[in-house]
Structure formats: C-alpha cells, structure tokens
Amino acid sequence: MTVQEHLSRFEAVAKDPAGQLKGHLAQGRKVVLTAPVYTPEEIIYAMGLVPMGAWGGDMELRRSKEYFPAFLCSIVQSIVELGMAGAYEGASAIVIPSLCDSLKVLGQNWKYAVPSIPFIPMTWPQNRTPDYARDFILAGYERLIRDLEAATGAVFEEERLEEAIRVYNDHDRAMRELAKVLAAHPEVSAAQRSAVFKSAWFMDKAEHTAWVTELLAALREAVVGPKKLPVVTTGVLADAPGITALLDEYGFTVAADDVAAESRQYRTDTPEGGAPLERLARKFQAMDCCSVLYDPQKRQVEHIVRLAKDSGAKAVVMLLTKFCDPEEFDAPLIKKACDAAGLPMVQIEVDRQMVNYGQARTMLETLRDTLTA
Ligand code: SF4
C-alpha cells in the first residue's frame, strides 16, 4: 500500500465514528464512551470493552441549549447534542472526567439529557502529585470499575490490566514516533495528519497501533515532498476541516503539536513496577504540561516554546476553543513566552459550530506572508 492509501484508511475512520460504533457492536463488543480528557481507557479495555472517544462533532447546537448556557464550551455541548440525537445509541456507558467546570456540568446534565446511556464519573484530584493524591486516584478507579461492571456486566481482572497497559504504552510510543516522522514528511497534509490522530479515538488501540506501524514503514520508503512552513499547533482540538484546509492552503505543515486530542494524550506512558492499578495512578500523577491539569508553575508555556524550537517550527498556531477557561487563562502567558522567544504566534478562536473561517484565513494568510517576507 502507498502512503496515500494508508492515510485514506485513517481518514475513512475519522470521518465515520458512527460506522465504527456500529462495527464494534456488530462484532458483539460493548462500547464505553470516553469524554475528554485523560479518561483511563486502559481499565475499560482490560474489561474487554471498547473505549470510544466522545469529543463531540462540528454541528449546529440546538437541543443542548435546553441544558447549557450559550457560553459553555461547544465540545461539551455537542457531546450532549449528539447524545440527544441518538448518535451514541448502543453504547453501554459514558465516562466523563471532572477536570474542568464544563465537564462537571456535562456529567450532571447527561443523566437527564441522555438517560439511555449511563453516566459514570471519573473524579481526578486537581493536586495530583502528592502521595495522598495516589490514594484518591485509586479510590476513583475502584469506583469506576464497580460502575463499569454494573453498567456492562463485564468483570475486571487485574491481570488483564497488565496486558491493556502494554497495548496502550505500545500505542503511545507508536504515536510519538509517528509525530516525529510526519514532521519530516510535509507531503502529508494537516488534514491527513489530523485524521490519523482522530481515528485513534474510535479504533481498538491494538489495531490502531498496527495501522500506524504500517504507515511508518511506508513513510520510511516514501519520497519526501517539497518543504513547507513548519508550525506547532496547540489547543484542545485541531480537527476542524476548515482549519486544516487553511493550514494546507497557506503551505503550513505541523512540525509538532501540543493538542489535547492529539499528542498530549501520548506523552506519558504507564510506568513499570508495582500493581497495575497503582501504575496507572502513577501515570496520571506524571502527566504534565496541559492547561487542563493543575500546575501553578505553568510548565506548558515553556513546553510549547521548547517544542517549537526542537521541531524547527517557525511559529505557533494556537487553536483556542471558545469559552474554554483553562486554555483562555494560559493564552496570554503563551503569547508572552512566544514573543520573548522571537516566535510568531497566532491565536485563532475555534468552536464546534464554526461555519465562517474568514478570521482564521486572514490570520493564517498574514502569518504566511510574515514568515516568507
Ligand atoms: S475544551 Fe476546555 S472547557 Fe471544554 S471540556 Fe475541554 S477543558 Fe473543559
């Protein structure tokens, strides 16, 4: 298969989460939806269930407004909109973590808006690094397991979690490698890169790792395309077709990303040593450099600048999800750090209801002109 044929497979999955859901159900597998961010999928996978990411979709929000004020982030609103429209029917449960205020509201409203799919909370501690936080995380996992068993009838066995951790660590490594290799292949468009990352949310992770490994092998044999303008993307989501199309139109290539739905997921492996659940708790404790994770030192800011320098990026494109408080608080700090490092940065506001990309076009066109002047 050629690189383009490999990429087409990922694009087909990314465009059709409903088809993937149907496919899993047709195989007799039970599906558990995982809302952003950092739901411990390994536990779900270990129980023989298929975790499927629920990050909403690009659409007009109508019925979700019965439950949310207009100024709540559109990711959360579109998850409920899809739930109310029946898009997730067949799923056995949804796990919603508690990492931001909007997600807390999502969980509570889901119970009434979509009563056919049980809501299971995953309560993370904000202050996650001390030893006592590990006990809190473990208690959260134990309750999550009990709720999953009740909702699905599946049984949790700790030995199977070892295997699930291995599958997820392998996937993390493959995705990190892929991000590096794609940076050297500007002929892979921003839209195609986005599809590879997005498809991971809908597939069995072992299968996705196998596909990514095949893509990596094909890329190593491929002729590298002409140079483009390398940028780092940051934000919660970067999958809006209107945005990726503009990145491609103005000749940008994603040299690296700091996107919550993309590489932030794959930075931290579950460490070795100890009981599997405890290892998984240590994984969450080790996560860092993300606006949604409490960090008074704001290490994410320096991380973005470092990522840009290390990847040879010429600029940072911040895709700021409208009404996302955690990202909005950090945006001025990121801008200041980029300015200090002599790194141009554009901040493009995005949401799940976007139909007009005029402002994004102007910003990206100006950025292209600045970088090529
Ligand atoms: S985009 Fe921001 S506000 Fe919305 S769920 Fe994610 S972290 Fe919360």
Image: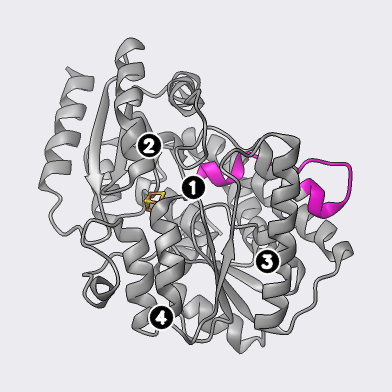
Q: In this view, does 104 lie to the left or right of 226?
A: right
Query: In the rendered image, which quarter contains the N terminus?
Result: bottom right
Say which residue appears at 63% left-offset and 39% top-offset. Answer: 128
Whether the magenta-drawn stretch holds residue 262 is answered as: yes
Q: Do the residues labelled 3 and 1 touch (CB within 8 Å)?
A: no
> Which label's residue is closer to the chain start, 2 or 3?
3
> Which label's residue is closer to the chain start, 3 or 1?
3
Residue 92 in the image: above or below residue 300: below
Amino acid identity at mark 1: Glu
> Which label's residue is closer to the chain start, 4 or 3?
4
Secondary structure of residue under mark 3 = helix
Secondary structure of residue under mark 4 = helix
Secondary structure of residue under mark 1 = loop
How crowded pointer 1 is (Cα within 10 Å; few <14, some 14-19, many 20+) is rated as many
Read off the residue under disc 1.
262
Q: Which of marks 3 and 1 is in front?
A: 3
Q: Which of marks 2 and 4 is in front?
A: 4
**Colouring scheme, one of rainbow, by chain, secondary structure, one colour:** one colour
Q: Is residue 227 visible?
A: no
Which region shows up in magenta? 261-279
- In whole angstroms, how far apart are the C-alphas of marks 4 and 1? 30 Å
Read off the residue under disc 4.
112
Q: Are marks 1 and 2 in contact (CB under 8 Å)?
A: yes
Amino acid identity at mark 3: Leu
> Which label's residue is closer to the chain start, 1 or 2?
2
> Which label's residue is closer to the chain start, 2 or 4?
4
Question: Which disc number belongs to residue 233?
Answer: 2
Q: Quadrant of residue 251?
A: top left
Q: In this view, does 332 lie to the left or right of 55?
A: left
Read off the residue under disc 3.
144
In-front residue for pair 192/307: 307
